[in-house]
Amino acid sequence: MSRRFAHAVILGKFIPPHHGHDVVIQAALKQSDHVTLLVSTQPSDLIPSQQRVTWLQQLYPSTTVTVMPATWNVADAQAWADGALAALGGQRPDAVFSSEDYGVQLAQLWNVEHVMVDRERTIVPVSATQILREPEKYQHYLDPIVANYFFGAGKGSRTPFISLES
């Protein structure tokens, strides 16, 4: 039986949100009373933060979606942990859910449990980087409301994306 958490956090860029994110979010929702999605933002983001927040609120209405401007050195793990905690209003969660090693490190810095979900990407074998590079090839990993951003009426394919990480 999985442990039950009062509050879980998922930190990500969600550029764009895709079915791999959904696997992590659904795992957190099943094991937690409350889930907060922390949307990391930077001025150079290729999809505006408000668009990502809107998608996440539509897709996961039972979660809290919080914007976290990353104004620190992105290579500084302690700065990430401090910035994320500040975005949470200083309220440390019980768990961090992720499919990435940064989630393990964040949980360690907060001294909370980490739940790794589909690290090898066997359930959903795609990354946001792949989707951004070839949206047409990977569009089946996007919810229709997100896919519409790339392929909506009159938009063609938005593919000005070269190299990003999820």
Image (cartoon, rainbow, N blue to C red):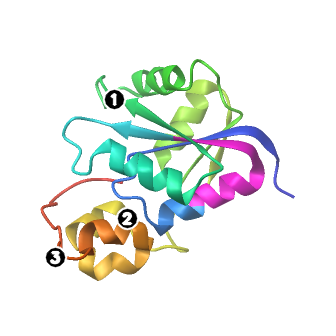
Q: Secondary structure at mark 3?
A: loop
Q: Secondary structure at mark 1?
A: loop
Provide residue 81's location: percent of width, then percent of height. Answer: 49, 26
Density class for disc 3 (Cα within 10 Å; few <14, some 14-19, many ≥20) is: few
Residue 34 shown in magenta: yes
Residue appearing at x 47%, y 41% in the figure: 102
Q: Quadrant of the N terminus?
A: bottom right
Horizontal side of 31 relative to 75 (left or right) equals right
Q: Are marks 2 and 3 in contact (CB under 8 Å)?
A: no
Provide residue 111's location: percent of width, then percent of height. Answer: 66, 26
Q: Is residue 118 visible?
A: no
Provide residue 98's location: percent of width, then percent of height. Answer: 55, 50
Q: Is residue 164 above or below residue 74?
A: below
In 3D space, how far apart are the residues under numbered discs 2 and 1 (Cα atoms)? 21 Å
Q: Is residue 156 visible?
A: yes
Q: Is residue 111 above or below residue 118?
A: above
Q: Quadrant of the C terminus?
A: bottom left
Task: State which mark lies toward you, 3 or 1.
Answer: 3
Depth check, front residue: 37 or 53: 53
Depth check, front residue: 57 or 153: 153
Q: Which residue is mark 2?
A: 127
Residue appearing at x 38%, y 46% in the figure: 13
Region in magenta: 24-37
Depth check, front residue: 111 or 48: 48
Residue 70: mark: 1
Horizontal side of 30 relative to 18 (left or right) equals right
Q: Which residue is mark 3?
A: 156
Q: Which of the two labelled residues, at mark 2 and mark 1, occupies the earlier sequence position?
A: 1
Amino acid type of the residue tagged 3 in the rendering: Gly
Amino acid type of the residue tagged 1 in the rendering: Ala
Residue appearing at x 37%, y 64% in the figure: 127
Residue 64 shown in magenta: no
